[in-house]
Amino acid sequence: MSLFRQHCLALLNLFFGVHWVACRSLKDLKAKGESTREGPPHYSPPGRLVSNCRIWSSFHRRPVSTRVLQICFVISICYQLAGCGQQENSDIQKNIEALSDEDLQVRFEAEMALSQIGERALEPLIGLLQEEEIRTRKSAASAIVQVVKTINDPEVTLQVVSPLIMASSDITSAFPRDRDTQEMYGYIGMVLNSIGEPALIPVTEAFASDDVRIRRAAARTIPQMWNYDQEIFFLAIEDDDAVVKTIAAIETQSALSKADVPTRGRAVKPLVQALKSSDPNLRGAAGGTLGRLGEPALDPLLEVLFSEDQTTRLFAGGAIGGIVGTGEDIDLLHRAMDPVLEVYEDKESTPESRNQAAIALRSILQNVSDPSICERVSLPLIDALENESEELGLFAAGCLGSILSNVSDPEIGRRAIKPLIERLADPNEVLNVRAESANALGKIISANRSLEFVEAAMPPLIEALQAEPQILRFHASHAIGDIASTVDGPELHRRVVPALIDSLQDNDRIVLEHVLESLGKVLAISEDRTLALSTVDPLIQVLENNDQRVRERAAWVLSEIDTTSAREALRISGVKRSPPPVRNY
């Protein structure tokens, strides 16, 4: 029997019991001819039937057996009500223990039962938040959320904020990956949202704690508290602990990007300072947030773009690229690009400064499609590729791959193709320069679709498929797939497919995935059925590869070919087809 039904039955019994005692006493008095009124005959106070002292005094004039029976009846009712309280405590304890069960359904049912009990379940649930097992604490937090929803009283709910922060203090990291931890933070957010502004008090107190773990957990609450008091963010970003700052930068990226200009301007200084930290996670988080602050962050970032620390320069360049965005604001783009381009073109500058300028240009221009700007930047980059050092050539090749696809002047593309092919084909060239050159060739040729460029670039790209360094084979296979799937030509397909089939023997999983991806792209647009059939047997062999993702890619290509032998091989192998994700290299 449920606890609710037990209470109802006990109260019902008590009502009928009292009514029976009163009626029995009244009947006895009437039998003796006594009045049931306290005052004069005309006075009859309503609702006082069982309060008349004469009625209750008649109880003492009854037979002993009647009095004993009535006393026992009342005692049984009281005992039943007491039993309901004991039963409720027993149910709370039983459900508290069930929250640690391995069965998810058992834990869920326990949470629902505790939510029905209400406020009395909060205290033992808060105690459960101190358990060592994270899964148990998460279940307790989930149950607390359900109880809070049932009670719907912010004052009662407020008492669980500090225990929840404490419960998550030892599992707080800048980048939580496990599901239990992420759900724990989600439950804290739900409780804070239900309380609103009054939750600022315990959260602010948590930031004043000497325990850094509690401050880290409190930093997770910034998104819920942002609309009530933005000072919470500044408390966190100016904390002595790098993890607290990192969490603050991550959690406020979206909110700061929508904040007013004064707030964004105030946030720039501590974030730029965090950009100079020795902690790589803090640098990355600060750079990502600065990139969303817009114009107020641009000039401070340009000041640190050529600082002594290479990592700081790298993140500053990325943040500037984020501010410029798609390049639609031409004035903002020029403010970011002009000083960087000036350093890059100045051959009197140190090689390190020019390298950093090239990196920054790549970040600034990666989403810019304005042909005039791309052409302006292309010429000094091509000059560096033709004449400058290996390192400058590396960044020039990478940057050219991002912008030359937007250049409409074929002469600029033709001038860039030659040094890129030379760097790719040179076995003595720095490996990364060769890899970036292959990547740039794939982007430029697939965008321009020039058969002239294809004829010049395809031989070194096919040769690179068999090169020893993995990164070169990786970029070459990707470039070949981009070119052959966009440039229409049966001769090109008959030239590329055998080279990709040979690469199906590659022992590197990443390279093999991209070879399969490129092969699928080419076969998808090729009308040569004989060419497609030539790939079936090699692909069937790949179905036996040890790596699951490689097998799934091979199954995807076979399903696209759709022959009897391919379908039979897929049926026997049982491998599921998995098309490659959309990539942007």
Image: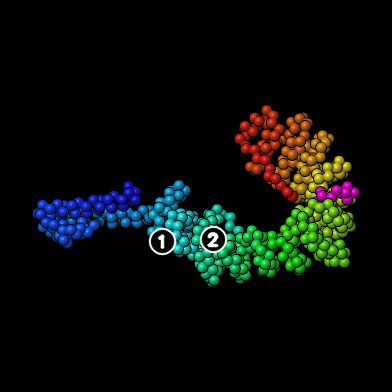
In the rendered structure, the answer to whether residue 8 lies left or right of residue 400 reads left
Q: Where is residue 34? Give x, y as percent.
A: 11, 56
Rendered residue at 50%/61% (across/down): 195
Q: CA distance from mark 1 to mark 2?
A: 22 Å
In the rendered structure, the answer to whether residue 565 lies left or right of residue 435 reads left
- Tell me which numbered mark, 1 or 2, is placed earlier along the sequence: 1
In the rendered structure, the answer to whether residue 52 lies left or right of residue 9 reads left
Main SS of the magenta part reads helix
In the rendered structure, the answer to whether residue 147 lies left or right of residue 357 reads left
Residue kind at label 1, given as amino acid type:
Glu
Rendered residue at 50%/58% (across/down): 194
Q: For the residue labelled by badge 2, is the local secondary structure a helix, a strand or a loop?
A: helix
Pointer 1: what residue?
123
Instruction: Please tell me the numbered disc located at residue 171.
Output: 2
Q: For the residue labelled by badge 1, is the local secondary structure a helix, a strand or a loop?
A: helix
Residue 404 lies in the magenta stretch? yes
Rendered residue at 65%/43% (across/down): 549
Number of numbered discs on residues: 2
Residue 208 lies in the magenta stretch? no
Whether 503 is drawn above or below 110: the answer is: above
Q: Which residues are magenta?
A: 401-413
Residue kind at label 2, given as amino acid type:
Ile
Q: Is residue 362 visible?
A: no
The image's colour scheme reads: rainbow
Whether 551 is drawn above or below 358: the answer is: above
